[in-house]
C-alpha cells in the first residue's frame, strides 16, 4: 500500500520554497534539462526549483506502471518514445561510470554486472565494456570520447560524475548516432533516448522530515547532519526538509556538514548533547548513521527519532535498539534498469524519455522483511539493491 502525502504536498505548494550517493554540483536546471528553471530563495539562501519540488512530492503518491515484483522496470508518469530508428542486431554495451567510490555505487554496480550476466546467457548482450572515471570529470569525458571513437558500441550507458561539465560529452555521444542512456545523475540535455532515475532528492528529504514531524512532540529539537554542500541531490534533500520543518513546531538546532565521516558525526552529535537535548536526527544520507546513534549511547541519552538510510549497518542498529526510525531510499535497484533499457531499445521497443522509478522508504512495517532478505549481506550493503532474483545472489554481493 502506498502512503498518502496529500497534506504535505498541499503545504509544499503553499510554502515559500527555497541530493548515498551523487556528487553533482548545482546547475540552473534540474537533471535531464527539463522542467521549470526558476530559482527561489529559502531562509538559508540555497537555490531550488519549486516546480520540480512540487512534482517530486506529488509523484510519491503516483502508482507506478509495470510489474509489482520488478520495481526496476516500473515507471511513474512515463512519456514513451519510439526507438525504431535504433533497432539493430548489435549486442555490444558500453558503460561510462562516474565511479565506484562509495558503498551505494559498489552495491549498484554489482547488481548491474549480475543483470548483464543474465542477458549474456540469454544471448541479448555479447560484450559489456566498462570505464570507471574515479569521480574525475576529465577522465570521464575522455572515456566517453573513446567509446565514440571506437565506433563499435551499440549503446552507451552514462552515469555522469557531474551535470554541467559532462553535458557536452553526453551530447557528443548522442550525435554519434548510438543510443545513449543516462542514469542516476542527469545532464543539461535531453538528447539521450532515456534518462533513468528514482523520484529524486526532494522526495527523499521530505520522507525523512515528515517522519520526524509525525513522531516528535511539538517543541522537540532536531539536529540535521549533512554530507557535503553544493551537491544537487543533497541540497534538494535539505531544501525539502527545511520547508517541512518550517511548517512544523519542531526546533532545528543546526545543520552540520560531516563529510560522511563516522568519527566527525559522533563528535558533532556529542557536542550538541553536551549543550542540551537532541530529540531527533535528520540525515541527508545514511553514511555514518550508526556513529550518530552511538553518540547517544555513550552519553547515556535516550535514542533519538532517527532518519537514516537503507544501508544495512543502520537498519541492523535500528532493529537492535528498538528506536523509532525510518530508512529513506534512493533506489539502488536503478542500476538494473539502463541495461534492460538498452536491450529494449535494440529491439525497437518504446521506453520512457524520462524513466522515473519508485522510491519508497523502509519503515518499521517492512524493515524485518528487508533484513531477512539481506541477512547474509555485509554492513555496507543496501537493502533495496533489487538483486535477490539474480543468479549471483547472494555471493556476488557478499564477496565484494
Image (cartoon, grey):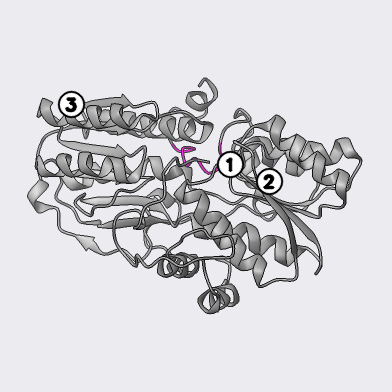
Q: Residues within 10 Å of mark 2 (few under 14, many from 20)?
A: some
Asked if residue 384 is among those painted magenta in the image, a careful observer would answer yes
Question: Which label number is shown at residue 206?
Answer: none
Q: CA distance from mark 2 to mark 3?
A: 45 Å
Out of 25 and 358, give the one closest to the viewer: 25
- For residue 399, say whether it is visible: yes
- For residue 320, say whether it is visible: no
Magenta highlight range: 382-389
For the residue labelled by badge 2, is the local secondary structure a helix, a strand or a loop? helix
Question: Which label number is shown at residue 146?
Answer: 3
Q: Left or right: 24 with respect to 371? A: left
Q: CA distance from mark 3 to mark 1?
A: 33 Å
**First reached walking from the N terminus: tag 3 or tag 1:** 3
Residue at the far top in the pictured view: 399
For the residue labelled by badge 3, is the local secondary structure a helix, a strand or a loop? helix
Out of 250 and 85, give the one closest to the viewer: 250
**First reached walking from the N terminus: tag 2 or tag 3:** 3
The vertical placement of 84 against 268, above or below, is below
Residue at the far right in the pictured view: 300
Magenta residues, dominant SS class: loop
Q: Which residue is label 2 attached to?
A: 368
Q: Residue at x 60, y 60 (%)?
A: 241
Q: Residue at x 46, y 64 (%)?
A: 56
Report x, y in % for residue 334: 41, 45
Question: Which label number is shown at residue 227?
Answer: 1
Q: Nearer the viewer, mark 2 or mark 1?
A: 1
Asked if residue 139 is among those painted magenta in the image, a careful observer would answer no
Amino acid at each position: 500500500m502506498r502512503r498518502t502525502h496529500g497534506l504535505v504536498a498541499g503545504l509544499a505548494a503553499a510554502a515559500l520554497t527555497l541530493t548515498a550517493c551523487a556528487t553533482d554540483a548545482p546547475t540552473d536546471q534540474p537533471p535531464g534539462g527539463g522542467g521549470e528553471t526558476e530559482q527561489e530563495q529559502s531562509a538559508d539562501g540555497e537555490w531550488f526549483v519549486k516546480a520540480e519540488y512540487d512534482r517530486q512530492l506529488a509523484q510519491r503518491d503516483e502508482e507506478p506502471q509495470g510489474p509489482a515484483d520488478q520495481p526496476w522496470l516500473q515507471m511513474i508518469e512515463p512519456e514513451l518514445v519510439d526507438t525504431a530508428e535504433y533497432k539493430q542486431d548489435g549486442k555490444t554495451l558500453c558503460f561510462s561510470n562516474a565511479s565506484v567510490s562509495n558503498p551505494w555505487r559498489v552495491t549498484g554496480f554489482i547488481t548491474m554486472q549480475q543483470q548483464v550476466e543474465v542477458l549474456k546467457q540469454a544471448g541479448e548482450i555479447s560484450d559489456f565494456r566498462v570505464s570507471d572515471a574515479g569521480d574525475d570529470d576529465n577522465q570521464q569525458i575522455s572515456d566517453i570520447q573513446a567509446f565514440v571513437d571506437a565506433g563499435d558500441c551499440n549503446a552507451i550507458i552514462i552515469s555522469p560524475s557531474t551535470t554541467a561539465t559532462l553535458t557536452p560529452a553526453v551530447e557528443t555521444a548522442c550525435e554519434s548516432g548510438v543510443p545513449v542512456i543516462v542514469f542516476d545523475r542527469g545532464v543539461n540535455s535531453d538528447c539521450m533516448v532515456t534518462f533513468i532515475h528514482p523520484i529524486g532528492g526532494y522526495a527523499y528529504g521530505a520522507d525523512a522530515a515528515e517522519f520526524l514531524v509525525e513522531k516528535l512532540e511539538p517543541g522537540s529539537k532536531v539536529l540535521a547532519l549533512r554530507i557535503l554542500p553544493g551537491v544537487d541531490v543533497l541540497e534538494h534533500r535539505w531544501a525539502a526538509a527545511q520547508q517541512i520543518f518550517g511548517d512544523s513546531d519542531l526546533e532545528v538546532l543546526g545543520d552540520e556538514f560531516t563529510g560522511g565521516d563516522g568519527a566527525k558525526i559522533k563528535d558533532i552529535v556529542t557536542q550538541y548533547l553536551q549543550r542540551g537535548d537532541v530529540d531527533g536526527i535528520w540525515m541527508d544520507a545514511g553514511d555514518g548513521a550508526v556513529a550518530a546513534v552511538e553518540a547517544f549511547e555513550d552519553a547515556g541519552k535516550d535514542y533519538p527519532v532517527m532518519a537514516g538510510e537503507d544501508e544495512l549497518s543502520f537498519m541492523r542498529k535500528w532493529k537492535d535498539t528498538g528506536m523509532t526510525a525510518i530508512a529513506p531510499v534512493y533506489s539502488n535497484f536503478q542500476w538494473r534498469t539502463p541495461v534492460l533499457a538498452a536491450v529494449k531499445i535494440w529491439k525497437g521497443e518504446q521506453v520512457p524519455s524520462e524513466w522515473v522509478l519508485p522510491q519508497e522508504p523502509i519503515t518499521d512495517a517492512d524493515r524485518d522483511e528487508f533484513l531477512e532478505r539481506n541477512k547474509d549481506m555485509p554492513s555496507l550493503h543496501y537493502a533495496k539493491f533489487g538483486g535477490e532474483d539474480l543468479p549471483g545472489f547472494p555471493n556476488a554481493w557478499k564477496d565484494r
